[in-house]
Image (cartoon, coloured by chain):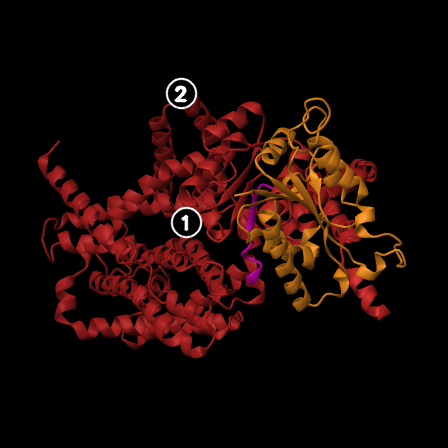
Chain colours: A red, B orange
Amino acid sequence: MSTSFLVDAIAYLLAALVCVPIAKRLGLGSVLGYLVAGIAIGPALLGIIGEQGTDIMHFAEFGVVIMLFLIGLELEPRRLWQMRTSVGVAGSLQLALTTVAIGAGAMLLGLPWQVSLAVALALSMSSTAIVLQSLKEQGLMHTSAGRTSFAVLLFQDVAVIPILALLPFLATGVGQGASDHTSVLADVPALLRAVLVLAAVAVVVVAGRFAVVPMMRAVASARQRELFIAASLLIVGGIAWLMMMVGLSPALGTFLAGVVLSDSEFRHELESDLEPVKGLFLGLFFIAVGASIDVASIAAQPLATAAIVLGLVAIKAAVLVAVGRFVKLSLDQTLLFAIGMAQVGEFAFVLLSFSVQSGVVPPHVSSSLMAATAISMALTPLLVLALRLLVLPRIGTRQAPTRQADDISEHHNVIIVGFSHFGSTIGRLLRANGIEATILDNDSDRVDLLRRMGFRVYYGDATRADLLAAAGAEQASMLICAVGSQETTNAIVELAGKHFPHLQLLVRARDRFHAYELMEHGVAFPYRDGVETAVRMGVDALRATGRRAYAATRAGSQFLRYDEASMAELATLYRSDDDYVGAVRRHVAEQERLLTMDIQADHTQGDHAWDSEPMRKGVSRRD
Amino acid sequence: MRQLLLVFAHPRLEASRVNRRLLDAARSVDNVTIVDLYERYPAFDIDVEHEQRELSKHDVMVWHHPFYWYSAPPLFKQWIDLVLTFGWAYGPGGTAVAGKSVHHAVTTGGGAEAYSHDGRNRYTIQEFLRPYEQTARLCGMSYHEPFAVHGTHRLTTTDIEAEALRYRRFLEDCLHEH
């Protein structure tokens, strides 16, 4: 091992360790920290890394490939389908209008149309890392501005794939030569080439389903964690290589593989194994980008750079205002959305450097734009702060205290994780007594139904802190864990204890042994499985929300009586489900019936005899 | 200093503006321990040993409940049945509560005039409460004239405040009597 490699590695790690915590402390986000670290050790300042920065960037692009694999893993096709309207409308409008506006501007400045288009596509991206981070920090994820931002970012994430595929076709030879991806198909006739490309995609899809999963099973049985990481990297690397061989974007291939594997049993292992690797590679990537920023030329023409940055931010903000108004955001929400998303994002680095490699964009254009991108990212937190302090108070509608009608329901005190038989009993009991809980579930059919029934439902994996936070764990007072799986339950208990220690936890235990295990982890009273336990959990939840013990207990007994009385009728319907909904959707059909029945039933209890109100009214009438 | 145990029973306190206010007033008096029976034992599953221990620690008891059908809500009867046991509170060796004093505090929907020999209810409150009086006496406790808030349906907010103050004074008197 050569010492020069170690010197480089030490420089990268040290710069990151110094700059990233400082940037985070200042509220500027880790991306900016990495960029500054790169600038610091780059040729412009300390000069510790020089020309090899570009090589490092090629190497570090593997981080982007892993990132897209992970995005694919998270994006189950069904989930994308659920968000189709908001993502499709807001996202496509933003991308199209911004691309047209920036592209037109670039052509006016005298760039050829191919370069203008490539540049405009890259610059239309916003920064997922910065926007989501700042939305979360300011508690704005649930405002309509937050949701619209997320939808647009999601669209951009997906749009990167076709854009990466499109860029090489814009090559005009102005750059440093054609793509360095060595495709073996370069000399093959076009038709055969197309067939081979399709075949490669098919290989990814089929292998993802039928080869990867058995391989992972075999690896998992060896019970060596590092082998699993190696296998994960092998999958990503192998697909990236295959795609490059046929001349497709490696990111596209790994994204596809991610989607294919998103419903496999190894999804979570893949995610947790690759996440830190991705983080490191991406960090390296951002450092390399920072090192490649030509500080000298910016310093030489500060006015030109400032003009580019301000122009870009102004154009992007203007388009976002139009989009915000089109999807009917209120004025204050529109401004938050527009200013928050007006920066150029990290995908621009990816797309710009890819454009340079593909010979579409000349390096000097790219480097000044990358500098503008980095500066616009640094500006975002400052602009948002100014907006919140100076502009929004004058509009008179401050977003945080005055929520819109549909936002009020988002902050329930109770979160229920898991809405199968057990969880739904609790949720129905609470609803019958006027407590609307927020529900987290990972069955998309059920999520659909619950949304239709007016529940506030989040779809996804509750072992992720960000999803719990999105469901309002920070504002909630109680988390009811009604999940069936022991592992998931334990993970949720651990996660809640670590990230949301203020939450009161009511936890379902599979059996006595699982209950002991939970008690070791600080759950004082685990609820052992069964219908009556579910009811008791609901009663305790009612008590915790301030209900008198006796009223809550009566509500529980009454609910159980009502539920049991309906069993005979529901039993006859259960058989007939097979005829028209099929066994798979049976539980959804059942839940739909139960919830509809609940709405029609009278849950106001037969306890009016104890209320003095009717008697008071009677007395005053008599007077 | 004497200690007062307030045994309180109301199945639906959340719907009773008068009793909520009275209980608040009781909370502001020193040396008063409140046992909110329906909150503590919603399933009627009374912890007898605990209740007996509590009772032993106090010198005065106030039995506070709404006057349902000329009597107390069922959980209060359950408390009497289970806590004042043979051989502990009465019978051979049953001297645990002897010498303590008991006061009753009740709220009625009907007016004071209804609880008289000429009134609609034909008997006085004290007469209706005879079984409780004898229960206390059998256990060797002294039983006193009840504190009553009448005509709760017609009370205005100002009336209720005045009753709360009266209840507070009543509890203080219970603590200081001999």
First in sequence: mark 1 vs mark 2: 1
Residue at x-position 53% and y-position 61%: A86
Q: Would you call the spot at circle 2 few (<14 residues within 10 Å), some (14-19), or many (20 or more)?
A: few
Q: Which mark is residue A222?
A: 2
The span shown in magenta is A408-419
Name the residue beneath numbered marker 1: A190
Q: Secondary structure at mark 2?
A: loop
| Residue A257 locus on image (x, y percent) | 45, 41
* x 69%, y 29%: residue: B89
Give the camera-side residue of A362 and A38. Answer: A38
Q: Find out whether residue A416 is within the magenta segment.
A: yes
Kind of residue sitting beneath label 1: Ala
Q: Chain of mark 2?
A: A
- Mark 1 is surrounded, within 10 Å at the Cα level, by few (under 14), some (14 to 19) or many (20 or more) other residues, namely few
x%, y% of residue A41?
Answer: 14, 51
Viewer can see residue A358? no
